[in-house]
Amino acid sequence: MARQLDEQIAGRFPVGQRLRVLDVGMGQGTQALRLARAGHQVTGLEQDATMIAVARAALAGEPEGIRERMRIMEGDGRETGVHFLPGSFDVVLCHGVLMYVEDPDPLLAGLARVLAPGGLLSLLVRNGDALAMRPGLSGDWAGALAAFDTTAYRNRLGLDVRADRREALTATLAGIGAPLHAWYGVRVFTDTAADGAAVPDDLEALLAVEEKAGRTDPYRGVAALLHLCGVRG
């Protein structure tokens, strides 16, 4: 996903431009910190105190120049209008958040609002068109059958959450003025890997295959996650 995001940024902004980035629901700050290291001015917004503590600890170990480029804020991603003015950011990330939001449309509208014209909106969502893949590949036939006609599922944390269908999200992005520009699949072949599995020796080959599959039909359409990139008009 990081490679996909870098591809979109490189194709939209001049090389060397210091971008204003907002990471909504930044979690432990993996993408936010990576972009700060790349020279961008990054704001991470997160409401979970544990994740904030992890992100702040990671940031504290960085050189002063990187620490100065990254700001961590506690807050709800559905309240970006409270924290930021319209057009405040060139890039807005919202990765792994929508599945926890019952009605994501107001959140998405708020994200589009804080994007500058021509800005990039990056979403990572659970693929509602492929919910049967994980139980099916694991031999859970009852679970696979039940997954065909729903966007609800139970994640690996044991939480009941929701997935998004690409067609519906495409319509939503058009409606909020940030129409879909590109989309990718994420975790096409590796979704059934066990949590905590050892990193394979052939990691680079694995990543190359996943990256290729994530941009190639029909493989990307059955990925566990979808990475959708909209552009603010």
Image (tube, rainbow, N blue to C red):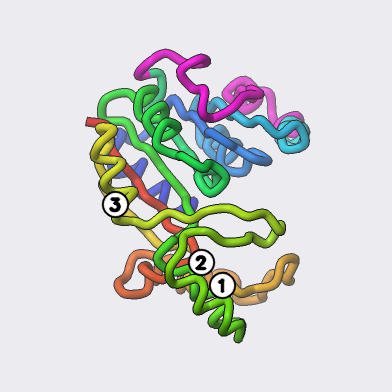
Q: Amino acid at mark 3?
A: Ala
Q: Is residue 36 visible?
A: yes
Q: Residue furthest left?
A: 233
- State how far apart marks 3 and 1 are (Cα): 22 Å
Q: Which mark is residue 187?
A: 2
x, y (%) of residue 170?
Answer: 28, 49
Q: Mark 3 packing: few (<14 Cα in 10 Å), some, or many (20+)?
A: some
Describe the element under mark 1 as helix, strand or loop: loop
Q: CA distance from mark 3 to mark 2?
A: 17 Å
Quadrant of the image occupied by residue 64: top right
Pinpoint residue 128: horizontal percent, then vertical percent.
43, 61
User: Residue 24: within the magenta?
Assistant: no
Q: Relative to residue 187, is residue 21 depicted above or below?
A: above
Which residue type carries mark 1?
Thr
* Marks 1 and 2, how far apart at CA: 5 Å
* Residue density around tag 1, few if under 14, some if 14–19, many if 20 or more, within 10 Å: some
Between disc 3 and disc 2, whose residue precedes?
3
Q: Which mark is residue 190?
A: 1
* Residue drawn at 62 percent across, 20 percent down: 68
Task: Tell me where residue 85 sits by quadrant.
Answer: top left
Where residue 213 appears, as percent x and y from the top left, is 39, 71
- Kindly identify the residue that appears in the image at 32 percent across and 70 percent down: 216
In the rendered image, the vertical position of residue 20 relative to residue 101, given as above or below: above
Q: Are marks 1 and 2 in contact (CB under 8 Å)?
A: yes
According to the picture, the residue beneath numbered tag 3 turns out to be 182
Quadrant of the drawing holding the C terminus: top left
Q: Tell me the magenta residue range.
A: 59-87
Q: Is residue 205 visible?
A: no
Pinpoint residue 41: horizontal percent, then vertical percent.
51, 25
